[in-house]
Image (spheres, helix red, strand yellow):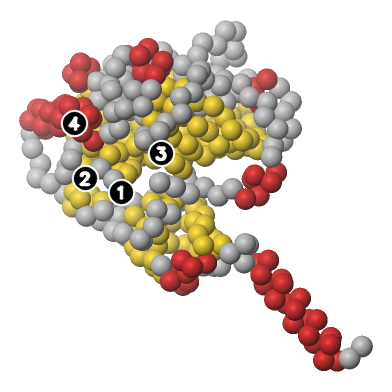
Amino acid sequence: MNKKLIALIVLVLGFLMAGRAQDDGKIRVQGTVIDARSGEPVAFANLGLLGTVIGVASDMDGRFELVMPYKCAIYKIRVSAIGYAPAEMKVYEVKDKPDLKIRLNPVSYGIKEVDVYGELLIYKKMLQNVVSNISKNYIVKPYNYEGYFKYVTDINGKEKVKEATVTIYDSRGYHREDTESAYRAVNYKFNEVRRNQPVTSVLDGLTCLDDVLTADIVRNTRNVLDIVNSRDYKLKSKGKMVYEGDSVQVITYTAVNPSVSTAGDPSVKTYSGEIYINLKDLAVIKNVTHITSRDFNTLGRNLVVINENPKNEVEMTVTTSYKKLKSLYFLSGVSISYSYEEEGNDVKGEMEFVTTRVNFNNPTPIQGRIYYEDIKENENFWNQYSVYFQE
């Protein structure tokens, strides 16, 4: 064969392969957001493409994947997280890096000490103001939000992973009501599901999304924002931080005599955490709760389990984050990690939910909640799916 013809064929094949490598005209920037001092991952850091609505949040391990058209190669990515100075970088400088690590520098400053009683009154009043400002800061009409849900269970080192896309409908929005009213106002459905193992038991089909919804402390009661229970909490300042140029007050709380009314868990033993409040508008932008309990409900905290094996040494951490869209905040992410012993087995679990879209202009009502699903995997969908926020 003619050498020039061979060279031409090779050249054409090279262009074809390069075109395929571009993945249909998309750029993927992926990596991990970490604390520049400690090297620890930064969960729920916000990564947004300046000048667009494209964005994503890092997961519990600080990992992220940001997908965008090739025309955005000259744009800048802004990375921000509570308690850290924001960082910016150009897309073309970080794309295609296999082990990208974005280091954020912690930023904080202290406040003057006050007496314990005075401090309690100060932060009790601040929490009261947070509640009274919910109608100003959060969505207070019917709306949908869509998100990515991941649930990992580990029993003695054997992992089961479920991923899903979920659509949630809130018929009232952020009205702080009793537990039953809040429960009835929120419904959801599972759209697409992917597993790393075939379904072998009824437990594999359980959705367990109720625990994510319960973690929304602004929308739900039985937590530190219940003013009627404020006397049951010890409140103390952990200091102030800077987030997106605003000053954020961090308040630590500990339930003196935790119960189902203060923690939403009938088996609770200890209940404590940290709540992050934006001092500019008195909105909660993050909450971290630490729980130990005498038992663990496999079906979720809103359901009743009969004749389940007892669990020992139950520990749980729940992290909830909120983000502002235009002038209103919404639930942007939830992570739940837990561990316990059951009949000599070490059981661990992690749930992660990231909101990818909010719709409060023309929401679609959803009837009921899906507690069990047997959806077959759509491989084509998951091959094209990426977790990022769309306005």
Q: Amino acid at mark 1?
A: Ile
CA–CA distance between discs 4 and 3?
21 Å
| SS label for mark 1 | loop
| SS label for mark 4 | loop
Q: Residue at x 12, y 28 (%)?
A: 125
In the displayed orientation, state which residue is furthest to the front: 362
Q: Residue at x 70, y 44 (%)?
A: 379
Q: Residues within 10 Å of mark 4 (few under 14, many from 20)?
A: some
Disc 1 marks which residue?
A: 82
Q: Residue at x 34, y 51 (%)?
A: 81
Q: Earlier in the sequence, mark 2 or mark 1?
A: 1
Q: Amino acid at mark 4?
A: Asn
Q: Earlier in the sequence, mark 3 or mark 2?
A: 2
Q: Earlier in the sequence, mark 4 or mark 3?
A: 4
CA–CA distance between discs 3 and 2?
25 Å
Tell me the tag on residue 358: 3
| SS label for mark 2 | strand
In the rendered view, tell whether residue 372 sits above or below residue 243.
above
| SS label for mark 3 | strand
Q: Residues within 10 Å of mark 3 (few under 14, many from 20)?
A: many
Q: Residues within 10 Å of mark 1 (few under 14, many from 20)?
A: many
* Residue 307 location (% of width, % of height): 60, 8
* Residue 176 location (% of width, % of height): 27, 21
CA–CA distance between discs 4 and 2?
16 Å
Of the residues tagged 3 and 2, which is closer to the observer? Answer: 3
Q: Amino acid at mark 2?
A: Val
Disc 2 marks which residue?
A: 248
Q: Earlier in the sequence, mark 4 or mark 2?
A: 4
Total marks drawn? 4
Residue 15 sits in quarter: bottom right
